[in-house]
Image: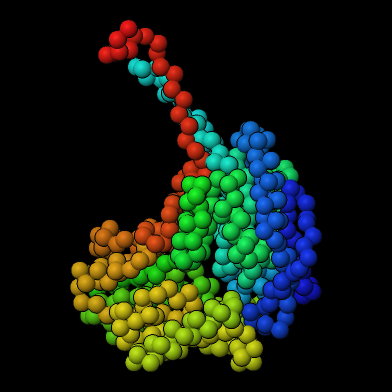
Amino acid sequence: MSNEPIVVHTIINGERVATENQYPRENPANPGEIVGYGPVSTREDAAQAIEAASAALSVWSRVPLTERIAHMQRAIEKIKAAANELVPLLSREHGKPLYDAGGEVFVTTMWMEYACAVAEEVLKDKVEVHENGKTITTHDPVGVVAAIFPWNYPLALSTIKIAPALLAGNTIVLKPSPFAPLAVSKTIEIIAEEFPAGVINLVHGDSDVGMELTTNPKVAKIAFTGGTATGRSIMKSAADTLKNVTLELGGNDAAIILPEFDVTDDRAMRRLVISNFLTTGQICMIAKRVYVHRSIYDSFVEKYIEAANKWVRVGNPFNPDVTVGPVNNRRQLEYVKSLIDDAKRRGAKVIPLGRILDSEDFERGYFLQPTLVLDAGYDAPIVAEEQFGPTVPVLPYDDEEQVISLVNDSIYGLTSSVWGEEEHATRVARRIQAGTTMINTAAVQGLDVRFPFGGYKQSGVGREYGVEGLLAYVETHVINIPTLGELPNIPE
């Protein structure tokens, strides 16, 4: 693909809409390079997009489900055909290595295909004839959906909302993050071409645009993925009109290493390292704090460092040997650095991991060498807060009661993992307060789009993926047809 900057657009009612201003998106591996430009949409643009979605709703909601599925399947094929363009573009604007960007496109289409495959069974009317007559249960569209999603997995986290929303008969207005707007905007434009005008609308912009999307009375549902603090604000904004919300928020996902875990299992150690540093640690479901039974702690640390030094290769995302790219943006880079510096000041030991393949590339971009943090306190910020970057604390524990208490003592509860003998690990998993707990794997390696995903506590409200991810975009409508006859206990 060309390295010339590309331009993406606001899309309202099927048309590209000109905006007065644009914002640049830099290459985090080489911040002097502008990958492309996104439009600066206004609050008025957002209101117009909502109006377009509202106008399209009355027609789209009555389109037969089989036709909606056919529209979505054509869009899926077009995304697959465009992968050779989307993958390098996502890699350049985000910082993901090419293999990681390709994996995101794969997960994106896999979910869309699953949603299409199960939509008829999940969304069809349920008719029950019983002793009191007949009951019909329908799944009606919620209405206009406002979808706001972050920069770390923009294609997957937009289509996780687009597919169920549109299959259920809703219309949608989407807003991406300015830190990775380009590949996802191209993807949304590809999808929009396969649907009637107004069904899919795309705006960009800052908090004023987000405020319009979350407060406009014509928006019936908000689907948001992002930070917990923003999620709280969205709930407040939605309260005045009691909007339906699905919020997938932050997590401080724990991994528990049980005493029987085999530290000499190279494949298991590699899986654990990947669960810490895939996408440079910038995944909501990455393993962000690791608790190791004290009886194997020293040997675990030794073998972990060996495994990390084999897998972690830091450099330009376009280098096929690279496994870890740059941090996505300077603000996030500085935040992760601040956590590491704070850990050092508190007396923790910080061990660099892996290899830097090109020192000039490293110095040029938003790179940070992955690190292992030892001897941190259980309540140190690098343990208690979500790092969202390439660093991981490893802490010892003495017994199950202690570690379960440490893991659950958090405002978060998105994902977790337990590593050890299956029956033992499953028994421990049942006591963890998390939306998903994986056994002997973690992060994207254990993701299955057929099953619901979401969090406990302040990690979110509702579920995405799976059947629940489709039902999150419908209202249940019960039609009762009773057998006519005498009603008991009612006087004539």
Q: Position of residue 476 (x, y in %)?
A: 47, 35
Image quarter of the N terminus: bottom right
Q: What percent of the width, then of the height, locates residue 203?
A: 68, 58
Q: Is residue 148 above or below residue 395?
A: above
Could you say where residue 185 lies in the image, as x and y percent from the top left? 69, 60
Residue 163 seen in the figure: no
Front-lying residue, 308 or 203 = 203
Residue at the location (52% across, 44% down)? Answer: 473
Residue at 67 percent across and 62 percent down: it is 204
- Residue at 74%, 48% in the rendered image: 13
x, y percent for residue 93: 66, 73
Q: Residue furthest front?
A: 240
The part of the image, by quadrant, that contains residue 357 is bottom right
Q: Is residue 57 visible?
A: yes
Residue visible at 59% across and 76% down in the picture = 328
- Please say which color scheme the image uses: rainbow
How many labels sit on residues? 0
- Is 402 on the left or on the right of 474, as rendered? left
The image quarter in which residue 416 lies? bottom left
Residue sitting farthest toward the top: 492
Figure check: 319 above or below 197: below
Q: Does 232 sit left or right of 429 as displayed?
A: right
Which of the image's four quarters has the C terminus?
top left
